[in-house]
Amino acid sequence: MPAKSALDSHLIDGPAGQLEALLELPKNGAPAGMAVICHPHPVHGGTMQNKVVHTLSRAFASQQFASLRFNFRGVGKSEGSFDNGKGEIQDALAAVEWIREHIAVGPMWLAGFSFGGAMAIHAAVQSSASGLVSVAPATSSFAKDLSLQPQCPWLIVQGDQDELVDINETIDYVNSLEPGPQLSIFPQGEHFFHGRLIELRDTVEDFIGSNL
């Protein structure tokens, strides 16, 4: 049974203006860690309310983390306009800075889905994150040319029937890294994890719990 949690709305300072955000706090006790969660592609309808992003937030809450999900620039009440990934990395780093200032306890993890999964990889490198979860990350478009890779526990989750992120490209990406992240492949799983969100949450919870 996932931990009950409380949601607080915030506007945080970003490099292109204010960013709309939701802070999810574990209800039974003080936070023991922090997480920032990045949503899918802004131009294609991605928001912090996405079901996979929500599932990631709940997974962290169950492990006693405070999790911050936010809308990238130009989405919802967030100011600015889409910057093809460059500005969005800076948005993620602004969210990391905010949660480190306002929660300031325990390890700081990053997570993201699709486009947000790639943004989280970049931000994890630049912020020296303690852990990283990338769900169906769009690495071939937004994270294939990194000169450095995250040096923390790192989980990539993807379905083998993903219609937007080619599973073979993800496998090649993982094999190009040393040391590589842990890869969890969902048989018959597609991009949005329809019907598999509980399984996704359990997989992420187990990874977080085993790497604290």
Image (spheres, rainbow, N blue to C red):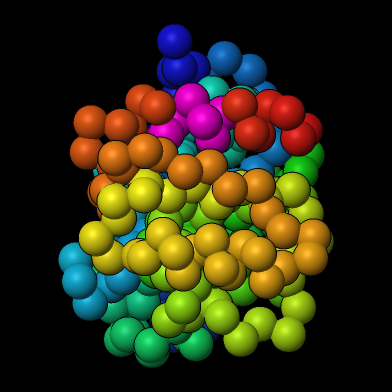
Position of residue 163 in the picture relative to residue 32 (left or right): left
Work out whether residue 116 or residue 49 is closer to the camera in this orientation and state it: 116
Residue 150 is situated, as x and y percent measured from the top left of the image, at 73, 65
Residue 190 is situated, as x and y percent measured from the top left of the image, at 27, 48
Question: Residue at position x 56%, y 68% from top?
Answer: 172
Question: Residue at position x 54%, y 35% from top?
Answer: 204
Extreme residue toward the top, this view: 1
Position of residue 189 in the picture relative to residue 3 (left or right): left
Question: Residue at position x 77%, y 33% from top?
Answer: 212
Tell me, yes or no, if residue 51 can be seen here: yes
Tell me, yes or no, if residue 93 can be seen here: no
Residue 149 is situated, as x and y percent measured from the top left of the image, at 73, 71
Position of residue 188 in the picture relative to residue 101 (left or right): left
Work out whether residue 178 or residue 41 is closer to the camera in this orientation and state it: 178
In this figure, what is the number of numbered marks?
Answer: 0
Our reading of the magenta stretch's main secondary structure is: helix
Boundaries of the magenta span: 200-205
Q: Is residue 113 magenta?
A: no
Position of residue 119 in the picture relative to residue 65 (left or right): left
In the picture, the quarter occupied by the N terminus is top left
Q: Is residue 24 above or below residue 147?
A: above
Quadrant of res 127: bottom right
Q: Is residue 194 above or below residue 152?
A: above
Question: Residue at position x 49%, y 87% from top?
Answer: 86
Q: Is residue 84 above or below residue 135?
A: below
Residue 133 is situated, as x and y percent measured from the top left of the image, at 57, 49
